[in-house]
Image (cartoon, grey):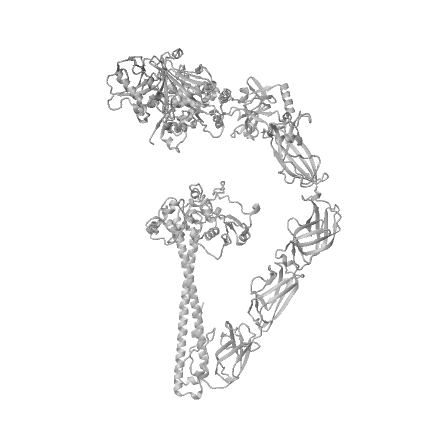
Amino acid sequence: MAEASRGSKGTALVLYQGGIGDGDAKVYRFQVLLPSGMSTSLTLRNPGEEMLVHDLLLSVKKELNNGHMGADGRLEEIQWSGNIYLTDLLDRKFTNKIKLSYFDTKSINILRLHDGKGAIVSTFENMWDLTPQTDLLQELPAEYSIESALVDLTDNALQALWSNGNEERKLIKITVDKEKIVIFDTGKGMDGSDGNSIAKWGTMGSSNHRVFREKGIGGKAPYLLPFFGMFGYGGTIASMHLGRKVFILHLSREVLLKQPLSENSKCTWKTAGGVRDPSKEEILLSPHQSFTKVEICGLKGHLEAPKLHGFLKDIYFPYIQYDEDNASMNTRNPVEFQVNGVNLAEIQEGEVTITNLHSSNGPDFVLHLKFSQVTAGKESIDSILEKLSNDAYGVKENFDNFSRVSIRRLGRLLPDARWGPLPFMEPKYRKGPKAEFFKRCCKRVKCFVETDAGFSPTLSKTDLAQHNPFTKALRCLGSNYSNDCSAMKVKVEVCGQDGRVLSLKQLEKQYQDWIKKMHDMYDVEVDAGDDEPTLVINPRSKERLGISNDVEVIRVYTSISRKGQTWMKGDHLKIHPGVTGRMKNSCHSLKTPLYTTLEYILVEGLQGDVCGEARIICRPIEFSDEQGCLIDEAESPNIYIQESVSFPVSIIDNAKCQKMDDDAWNKMLKKKTEKAPAGIEVIRNLENNALGIVGDLPFEDVVTAGYQPPHELVAVIRPGNYIPCSTGLLDQKYIVKDDELEMVMEIHLSSSKDHPRVELIHNSMKKPSSRNDINGLYFFPLREASSIFSKSGVYLFIFSVRCRDSRVIQHKTEIRVCPDPNSRCWQIFSVADHSAYNTPVEIRLGCPVRCLAVKSVDSYGNRIPFLDISNVIISVLDGDDIIAQVDDIKVELSSDALTLKAKDFMFKTSKLDILRPKYEANLKICSSDSEFSGICPCKVKPGFPSTIKMDMSLGSEKNLTPGRMIDNVLLEVFDHCSNHVEEGTELNVRVDGLSFQDKRGSVLQVNSAGLIDLSGALKVVSSFGSYACLTIFHDEKKIFSETFQIAIRELKAVDVPESCPAGSLLENIMFEVSDIDGVIDESIDGPLHTLIITMNGLPLLEGAQYAFKLGRCVVSNVQVPHEQGIVNIVAYHTHYPELRTTVQLQVHALDLVLSSVEEGPEPILSYPISSIPNSDLLFHSQLTPEHNFHLAEYIKDVIEKTTDEIDDTHSKMISEQKMIEALYSRKKALEDEITNLKDEIGPTVGSLINAMELTRHKIVENIGTAASVLCSISSGEHFIDDVIGVVALLGTVTDSKISRMLAVYLGKEDMLAVVCKTQDAANYIEKYDMDGNVKLDSGIHSEAAALGVPINKRFTIICLDAIEPYKGGLLWNSTQKELALPCPFPNLKKPNGFSGFAVNMINLSDENLNISTGSGYGLRETLFYSLFGELQVYETRKDMLQALPYLKGGAISLDGGVIKGNGKLLLGYSDPKITFPVITLSPNTLDFSEGSQDIVTKTNLLDANMRLLKKMEDNISKREESLNELFEKFNKKKRKFDKISEVIEPCSSQLNQLTPVQTPGKSHFKAEVP
């Protein structure tokens, strides 16, 4: 006990929790009240049956000393040595011994110490410790209001008295005034026991009723068992939330305690206590002499008693009164509630009471629900709201959002549990008459849900705990809550009034039947009018008429009987505030009375149909008949509501409208007319000061251009009773205030009053506003009209307002603006009929300017008449420098003196090169005295080409040789003033003896330097010794000509004998090419320079050509004919036949014999049999018999050898020819097979599966890549989640050209990139060891190893989460969700050939469309936008290049062009193997037919056959080439044999004397080659 007194929290907790602390030990706890007004606690352990009072007092004294209680002197005030004794609460006196059996070990026993002084103390400090747990204080919610605190205390009172017996009074009396709140209950009160002590009352979360929660589960509605204590914040917290000081009094038959509460300490809340007798009033209120009284002072807020009546009656309605659920239907009053002396059972206030009063007396719809957790017209509601609003309950709800479901727990209303209809209460029909019927009737239901203790409320007890499974299940009653896991854990059993279990469909059916029954019994609705209706089928503006969109026909009446009266078309009605009607722009609740004329009554459907509520159509008084509702009674009648308003017919039943007689109507009409808009007035400067506006507009006056208007203009609408000058301009009585009237201000400009053309320069519309407490002001900003008062002319201001009755009132006023003469200047506005405003005027040297027009204007461009001007000076300026000038030009003025014209003048200057290349300058015109001048930009271009200077650095004309390229030729072009001509000037260059080597043609353009550069463009084509000519024309006029001599060369033979023997051989004959000085031209060299030699007109050797080397050609030997005579040997250059020489040779007779026919050296470019060299020629006199024998044998061997070679070659030709024929036959069969395969594959490739399989197959063939491994995994599933696939397989295109070009743009690496969603998936694909080496036994490398195809190439991984997505939005109305990319072209006009953006040409399947990152972005916004960006697609390269200025992210063309941005072009040609699948239809509409494996097999076979066909074609080409070589070899051998025969024939007589040889015939060597 000593520890507790010193504030030991742990011991104090044991003290309040324990009855017996250790084993069987008895522990007595006492609170000793001292005569000094203090109190102390005392704990005795096992003191025995009795104890000396002296010993007990020593323990008290010791406790007081340990607690330092003597600091204030109070301990010394006790007379310990006097006549001291103790008494208990039953006034038993203990002087010597105290029997402990009188006291309870489970309670705190109170003893009072008397010291004999006789002083009486009624209050004892620190008697009770009510300190709450600090963690519970932190749970106090924001919505814990004053009302919540009061209800917490009332809950405590209700709990306290609920256990009273039947004969004991159950009363809760609450008294509220401005100073205090008193809560009195007749419960059993509190004592010192653990279960019913003041500490329990004051400590948050310590209610005894927590253990009785299970007793509150089940039973019978309304579950009146107020076990609320497990929720709430305790009496202390609730009391201190209401006021700053609390007094608690309680009587428990034996004792009455008085305890004031205050916030004494930051650490503990200890309260003083006391003892007094109950008052007579308290005994009268509680005859059984038990009660609790809580008195709270220093209120923190004020509670209004009238409002508190309804509030508390709503909360505790079943405890105040409820009807017994039996045949007697008796009303019970379980507890008597009084507020300020008013019995709540006797008042008709509060939502629940008013709802019951306005509800029908029919049977209720009652359900019994069991929840258990498993491990798997005038609407009555409008009347209710109106009554609650009139009773000042602050209801913010209307009919549509009024709470249809209220919750009570254990009979106590949870005020914040204001739910909408439960799912089973919602109308299930969507269309048709039944839908409209149930939609209307279901809104008339108010449901009260009675719950037991199984449902948990919030700590403030204002609502059910929202996340509790039972709460969720109740909210979902009648719907599918499969998406809510916690609600699925609750089993709900629905029972009807008869106790039978109902299914969901049965529940809905019973509810709908009950709705219809109640409707038939109690609802009163209009079904027909008094006259014959007009039927309108599918009426327009259903929302304006107030009818359902599902209604197909309405009946229109002009008369109806309601409330004993007839309401007819034309009746004048006054509709009261609070009524909601369908206005023109919205559904509006009237705030003021509306005066209308009844026009029509509308009823939905045909007679007898289930229909909606009838509507009355009324025209407000402000509108004319023409603006009201009209019926078009044509063949198909229709209704046009116009400005009229639709109201429910229930406003008649609810007396929300009343008829008006003619006098009242006319008075109102007159009043409206007087207040109706009649005119518009612009508020002038004097009153503007009151509005804080500086400046004024001088209407009906003249101002100078540039006049600065005020920032804003103010106009008002005047009513009909306004008389000008009768009152102040800003008197609110004479300013119409109507927020719906908009005023339009138009400003028109005409050049003068007499000018018929009017231009609208400003237009604005404003609604009224207020300033300085003045309403109905229309403010028009004038500075927004930027051109106002800058142009001269008449400014007409027109103010107009369209009134509610369609009248338009106007006000017109004007201001005249004249030009500003102080800012006069000249302005050139046309040169040679070309405007000088938009672009610089063009002037050309040598060409006269026909007319230059000038106007005189002010600084705002307003024209001012010219003064008398006789002549002017016109100059061309470069900055301040004069380039050209013309003086004293005569001028003329127009008839209105507004235009000055200078005619027929021309500029000449040689300084124009200063302005190159843009030729930009300024054209200035000024008067002779330079008083006025004008200037404008111009372009002064040089004259036409006149002279040309040529620079050709060849050294001399002898260097011009045929075939030579002229390296440096420059033509400098000048006009007649010696200025270089303009860049781009075209000249016609004609050549003779020369030719152009580029593709420019003969029409050439002058470059930016004034030159035509022909360097490297001309080639000499004339022969040696001829002439070449260069001539230049401009517009068919020759302006330049130049002739050139081509170099002279001579071909001659060196050291050729004049004669020689017949049949002899001339050796090493030399031919030389030299110039006119005899110098050898060593440039005649190489394979292009060859010599052809003929003898007597025939080639020396068939096809023989002899090469030059450094200007010389050496012929090793020339066979001299065997005949005698003169032989002409002619030699000439192969390409330059003018290089020719002729040698005459005298041949004389000489006898020869053949000594050898061996093959000699072969001449160039041919294979003839050579002549016999001199060493092989023997004279006849030298021959011997031995020579004859050997010669014959030799000739025989040569003939046999040649014959064998010819036969062998012929055999090879025949064999090769047969092989080629066989290959052609095989090729034809293979081509037929390929054609058949293509026909079979063609129709199938259109399907997505086959197209994807084709692409997948091509990817698999790229062995050694990650993409190949990914596509080869047998299951088809990716080896890890979040791996999406390969780029080439994630989208399709509709055209093969697009597919190819997109693949070209990306490249093979990006097409085979692997795509992942997250970085974790990317990290899993490849892992590394401690040294940074790739781990081949993990990730994709392990999959590759399992397939036997290790990855030996680097590969790209794309992580979607790491990509910055496109955030410009999507085209959501498109199935493909393309990106909403901005148009890159000005004026939204597409260039030719533009097909779209590449990123939007990729089609995605439904599966791929649903792929998204953690941030919600799809493949198109992330992957494909990162790959393609804003890449544009064009039809041709020409189209793409023309759109070059608009390319932001590069472009491709379908004919092969690629621009990758930033000037990067991709040239050359490539045919990628990996492309996007081509699908002609959308991937979402394709038929996924079977047979994809078959198409892959056929495709593999097709690829193999194509490769075989290519090899076969290569083999045929090689064999045909080999056959041609054999054919040439055969002809060569045959010609050689013929030559041998020709050589042998002259010596045949001699050879016949030797061994005879038979010469085979020529037919033996005949061969045919295909």
Residue 391 place in picture, x, y as percent = 50, 19
Q: Nearer the viewer, residue 1303 or 1357?
A: 1357
Residue 458 place in picture, x, y as percent = 40, 26
Q: Residue furthest bottom?
A: 1181
Q: Nearer the viewer, residue 1085 or 305?
A: 305
* Snapshot quadrant of residue 751: top right
Q: Nearer the viewer, residue 8 or 677?
A: 8
- In the rendered view of the protein, which quadrant contains the C terminus? bottom left
Q: Compared with residue 162, is residue 697 higher up or lower down, i.e. above or below? A: below
Residue 997 place in picture, x, y as percent = 56, 65
Q: Is residue 1143 left or right of residue 328?
A: right
* Snapshot quadrant of residue 478: top left
Q: Nearer the viewer, residue 495 or 594?
A: 594
Q: Compared with residue 236, is residue 744 higher up or lower down, i.e. above or below? A: below
Q: Is residue 1485 left or right of residue 977?
A: left
- Whether residue 136 can be seen here: yes
Q: How many marks?
A: 0
- Whether residue 449 can be seen here: no
Residue 723 place in picture, x, y as percent = 68, 25
- In the rendered view of the protein, which quadrant contains the N terminus? top left
Q: Is residue 509 left or right of residue 254?
A: right
